[in-house]
Amino acid sequence: MLFQWSGRDWLVHSPAKLNLYLEILDRRQDGYHELETCMVSVNLCDTLRFRSHPDRLTLQVIGGSGVPGDETNLVIQAAAALQKTTGFAGGATILLRKRVPAGAGLGGGSANAAAALLVLNRLWKLGLSHGELAGIAAGLGSDLNFFLESVPAAVCRGRGEQVQPVRLPRVCHFVIAWPHFQLSTGDVFARCQVSHRAITDFDARLANGQIRLHNRLQSAALRVRPELAHLATEFSAITSQHQMTGSGSAWFGLMPHRRAARRAARWLAGRQCVRDVRVAASSY
Ligand code: C5P
């Protein structure tokens, strides 16, 4: 997460994430799943601009193809949660330029909301501690806490809200493509199978420079939208190191270097099942 203060506005670049590893350990009483996942933030970013307003809270979304600017947007929910917690009565004018597609498992909405929590806490001079912000983030969604930590990579546990930063062995280069449809996180989790096997050796493998891709939600997503298999087939022609991110629908390939990622992106851009494609790198 990158923050810039212009003297009047806060400008924030909120990143997308990829799940390198995702395992489902248990189904919980509250309807959520206990998981263990390694998330990495990448330089595919949305941009948010925050300006103080005496009483009105507004969000304008540019380029989000259908992303709402109303109270269903997590950014507004994050701002409202801050107001409720502190009793703060002021407002803000927020402009969100979307580049990260919604419903793609890239965490764009969660990153936007985490940015709102961090920036509005400063802009409104609320003085909430990082722990207090983390508590609010966990109440808004499962991926917000990863973005709130602003770390390049982390293993996340619980519902996803327990974040333990990890160090990637190198800068990773990715090609990311998404199809013409979105996937609902709830629908995909509802069809997933629990494995009960924790990642015992993930950290050790990372320390040895190995990145092992795995996503337990992938087979569930393929049951929800069998057409997703076309995207998997296209990636298989490029690299054996590929998979879906989060609950989908975006797919990514881990590439040996930036040139290979660019070449793959050019090839994927011409495929019928691909709506859009980007190259991206992990922050290191
Ligand atoms: O927390 P978030 O809003 O991202 O989750 C959306 C939905 O995904 C939840 O309502 C739940 O059905 C499912 N989910 C889950 N286990 C998780 C995270 C999400 O079952 N760890």
Image (tube, rainbow, N blue to C red):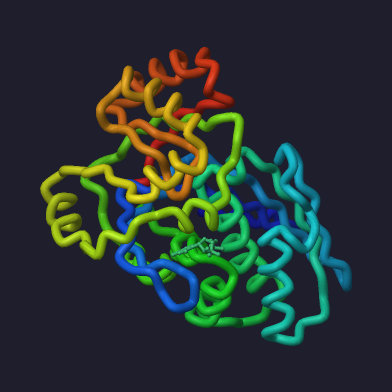
Which residue is found at the position 66% from the left and 42% from the top? 98
Q: Is residue 93 above or below residue 174?
A: below
Which residue is found at the position 73% from the left and 79% from the top? 83
Q: Is residue 7 visible?
A: no
Q: Is residue 234 above or below residue 281?
A: above
Q: Position of residue 185 (x, y in %)?
A: 53, 54
Q: Position of residue 124 (x, y in %)?
A: 72, 74
Left or right, residue 174 beside residue 76: left
Left or right, residue 213 beside residue 55: left
Q: Say which quarter of the image contains residue 89.
A: bottom right
Which residue is found at the position 32% from the left and 33% from the top? 242
Q: Is residue 176 visible?
A: yes
Q: Nearer the viewer, residue 161 or 116?
A: 161
Q: Say which quarter of the image contains residue 91.
A: bottom right
Q: Total label count?
A: 0
Q: Say which quarter of the image contains residue 86.
A: bottom right
Which residue is found at the position 52% from the left and 13% from the top? 270
Q: Position of residue 36 (x, y in %)?
A: 31, 62
Q: Nearer the viewer, residue 270 or 117?
A: 270
Q: Nearer the viewer, residue 264 or 128?
A: 264
Q: Position of residue 92 (x, y in %)?
A: 80, 65
Extreme residue toward the right, this view: 55
Left or right, residue 54 beside residue 108: right
